[in-house]
Image: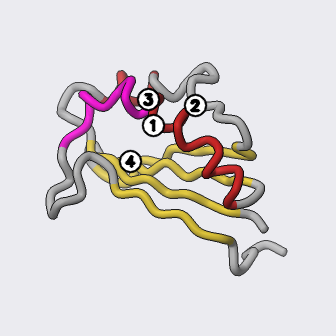
Amino acid sequence: MTTFNVVRFRIKAGREEEFLAAHRDGKARWPGLVAGHIIKTGERSYCLIGEWADAAAIKAARAEMIATLDSFRDTLEDLGGGLGVTDAVSGDEVVDLVA
């Protein structure tokens, strides 16, 4: 069953290009990732959306995803509310909107 993860970020002023560069050129090509996109959701706000074959694939890639995060963690602002610098969720697909 296809699994997705979504991670919300807020970038420090003047650091957006560093954040984006940390994901380009295969740096975020984690094993098991079927497709991945970063969308801009507001001023200095972004979400990463990853598509995975299943929950086991995302679990297996967790250490590598954290290593990537560590490479740009200093570009991120704390989101507040006890979240830290990321707000991550994941889950299985329940409806395909184009099928």
What residue appears at the point 75 percent right and 46 percent down from the top-left corner? 34
Which residue is the site of mark 2? 28
Reply above or below: 81 against 62: below
Q: Which of the 4 image quadrants contains residue 91?
A: bottom right
Q: Is residue 3 above or below residue 35?
A: below
Mark 3 or mark 1: which comes first in sequence? 3
Tell me what residue is drawn at x 65 percent, y 31 percent: 29
- Pointers 2 and 1 in contact (C-beta within 8 Å): no
Q: Amino acid at mark 3?
A: Leu
Camera-nearest label, 3 or 1:
1
- Chain-order first, disc 1 or disc 4: 4
Q: Which mark is residue 20?
A: 3
Q: CA distance from mark 2 to mark 4?
A: 15 Å
Distance from label 2 to label 1 (Cα)?
Answer: 10 Å
Q: Say which residue label 1 marks.
A: 66
Q: Please, what secondary structure does the residue beneath circle 2 have? A: loop
The amino acid at mark 4 is Tyr
Q: In this rendered view, identify the residue nearer to me: 62 or 21.
A: 62
Q: Is residue 78 left or right of residue 57?
A: left
Report crowding for label 3: few under 14, some 14 to 19, many 20 or more residues within 10 A (C-alpha). few
Check residue 46 in the rendering and tell me which mark sits there, or answer none: 4
Pointer 1 local density, CA inside 10 Å: few below 14, some 14–19, many at least 20: few
Which residue is painted at 30% across and 31% down in the image? Answer: 73
Residue 63 relative to residue 78: left or right: right
Tag 2 or tag 3, which sits nearer the N-term?
A: 3
- Distance from disc 3 to disc 2, alpha carbons, whole Å, reads 10 Å
Q: Earlier in the sequence, mark 2 or mark 4?
A: 2
Main secondary structure found in the magenta portion: helix
Q: Is residue 58 magenta?
A: no
